[in-house]
Amino acid sequence: MSLALADASIALIADFLNDGVEKQYPPSLQAILHRYPSPPTALNREQLIEIAREKNGGKLAKSKALKALEGNSNAAVLRLTGLAFAEPDVEIQMRLLIGLGGVGVPTASAILTWTNPNKFAVIDRRACAALMSIVDTDINPKSVAGWISYLAIAKRVAKRLGVTPMIVDRRLYSLGDSGPKRSG
């Protein structure tokens, strides 16, 4: 099946997720969301590192990714995040963000999502595994094209459920690798 899923597939995902979809963000996530204006004009280096640390469950200490993040000047972070947040095209937004040292597609998606949760979704291998267990699709969570496809699906399901793409993403993430197996 192509990455542009048919309406029937979107309905199947929405029906499956509807049982466990929370309409509110959990308090821990609300605390993260309230730290950043939505939508922001730019992030500074400290904020970039904080989001990357949160995205990776606090596991950045002494890692190559942390060293790469710390290698970004504050001016570069302000400039590239400012350009990304001002850019209307999601592919260009993503490509600007992954131009920062230590920022891959999953972290860039977290930056966009946590600064604008009504518009974006964080891509993660666990959420992709859950999605692929519901419908026949193949999404690479580390590619820009994979994130764009994932975001399109999350937006369509969110619209159907009356929630944000981020809430759809959180539900898929919670299912993780143990998501249901599709029939057929």
Image (spheres, helix red, strand yellow):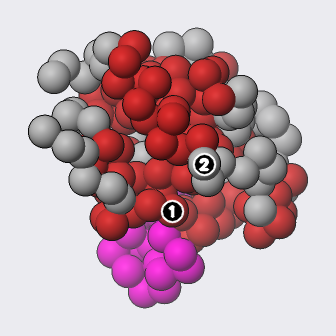
Specify the principal SS of the magenta part: loop
Bounds of the magenta segment: 56-73
Position of 62 with respect to 55 (left or right) is left
Point out residue 163 in the picture as x, y percentages from the top left corner. Answer: 70, 33
Tell me, yes or no, whether the highlighted magenta stretch contains residue 60. yes
Compared with 84, 16 (above or below) is: below
Name the side, left or right, on which 72 lies relative to 148: right
Q: Quadrant of residue 63?
A: bottom left
**SS class, disc 1:** helix
Q: Position of residue 148 (x, y in %)?
A: 38, 27
Q: Which residue is mark 2?
A: 19
Give the quadrant of the C terminus: top left
Q: Secondary structure at mark 2?
A: loop
Q: CA distance from mark 1 to mark 2?
A: 13 Å
Disc 2 marks a residue whose amino acid type is: Asp
Instruction: Find disc 1 in the rendering and name its residue.
Output: 174
Q: Residue at x 71, y 27 (%)?
A: 162
Of mark 1 and mark 2, the one earlier in the sequence is: 2
Q: Quadrant of the N terminus?
A: top left
Using a 10 Å C-alpha cutoff, classify the residue at mark 1 as few (fewer than 14 neighbours), some (14 to 19) or many (20 or more): some
> Are dots 1 and 2 in contact, CB under 8 Å?
no
Which residue is rendered at x = 38% and y = 69% of the image?
65
Question: What is the residue that sits farthest to the bottom in this orientation?
Answer: 62
Seen in the image, is 89 located left or right of residue 20? left
Number of marks in the rendered image: 2
